[in-house]
Image (cartoon, helix red, strand yellow):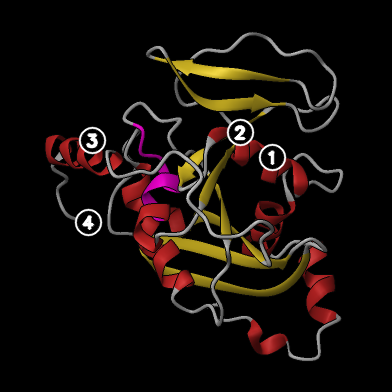
Amino acid sequence: MEIVDIAGLRAQQIATAGNVIRHDAFDFQTPSIIAGADVGFEQGGEVTRAAIALLRFPSLELIEYQVARINTTMPYIPGFLSFREYPALLAAWQRLSQQPDLVFVDGHGISHPRRLGVASHFGLLIDRPTIGVAKRRLCGRFEPLSDEPDARAPLIDKGEQVAWVWRSKLRCNPLFISTGHRVGLDSALHWVRRCMRGYRLPEPTRWADAVASNRMAFQRWRQGQESPDLFNPQ
């Protein structure tokens, strides 16, 4: 891997974050297709794996998926993960036979110290309405949530709200729902809530994880398909 210019990346992050559209800028009232995106690493981090799942809305049935595996081009550096992840996401995106109206990314959007998590970075690159659905806090503070499902609190960092902290399910840790690109904070939470089916994660990112990790639900789905060759593992 190449030597990383941290100062240059930081400056690029700050400049790029300024292009993120933080309000609703989409032309649908109800999306027809919603995507979920998930990124992981294999072979000790040498290979980056990105999975994108397309779901029909509002049924939330899986209709297509793509997986891309590429050589990792950047080491792990806290705060700069989007630079490490987006190349594989773009590779998977380019293989899709159709483009979704809305994209959920497993990761942060503007709820990032410099307001450019992977959901925002990727959303800018594809110029699609994008929402960050993160499992852990990266920055900011929030008031403790009650234990009830649908409990929420604003995540505040440097005096501004950067996400909703939202408990999707009883006895589960909350999610951090943020603007990625072209979706406001309230709309981001609205669409995530519309995509729940009783699990901690919304269906788009849950299916993306299932595809990436070849989980049992995905194996059953593949067995029920007449054309399992939709899957491209390369």
Which sits in the foreground, 100 or 233? 100
Which sits in the foreground, 79 or 215? 79
Helix, strand or loop at label 3? It is helix
Q: Is residue 140 above or below residue 118?
A: above
- Residue reaching furthest to the top: 143
Q: Nearer the viewer, mark 4 or mark 2?
A: 2
| Number of residues whose C-alpha sits closer than 10 Å to that of mark 2, classed few (under 14), some (14–19) or many (20 or more) | some
Q: Nearer the viewer, mark 4 or mark 1?
A: 1
Q: How far apart are the alpha carbons under marks 4 and 2?
A: 39 Å
What's the residue at 40%, 40% (across, down)? 117
Q: Which residues are magenta?
A: 115-122
| Number of residues whose C-alpha sits closer than 10 Å to that of mark 4, classed few (under 14), some (14–19) or many (20 or more) | few
Q: Is residue 149 above or below residue 225?
A: above
Residue 181 sits inside the magenta stretch: no
What's the residue at 46%, 59% (across, down)? 128
| Number of residues whose C-alpha sits closer than 10 Å to that of mark 3, classed few (under 14), some (14–19) or many (20 or more) | some
Label 4 vs 1, first from the N-terminus: 4
Q: Quadrant of residue 231?
A: bottom right
Helix, strand or loop at label 2? It is helix
Q: Amino acid at mark 1?
A: His
Q: Amino acid at mark 2?
A: Asp
Q: Is residue 215 above or below residue 17?
A: below
| Number of residues whose C-alpha sits closer than 10 Å to that of mark 1, classed few (under 14), some (14–19) or many (20 or more) | few
Q: Nearer the viewer, mark 3 or mark 4?
A: 3
* Mark 1, residue position: 190
Residue 1 is labelled as 4
Q: Amino acid at mark 3?
A: Ile
Image spot of residue 100 (x, y percent) = 58, 67
* Mark 2, residue position: 186
The mark total stands at: 4
Residue 14 is labelled as 3
Helix, strand or loop at label 1? It is helix
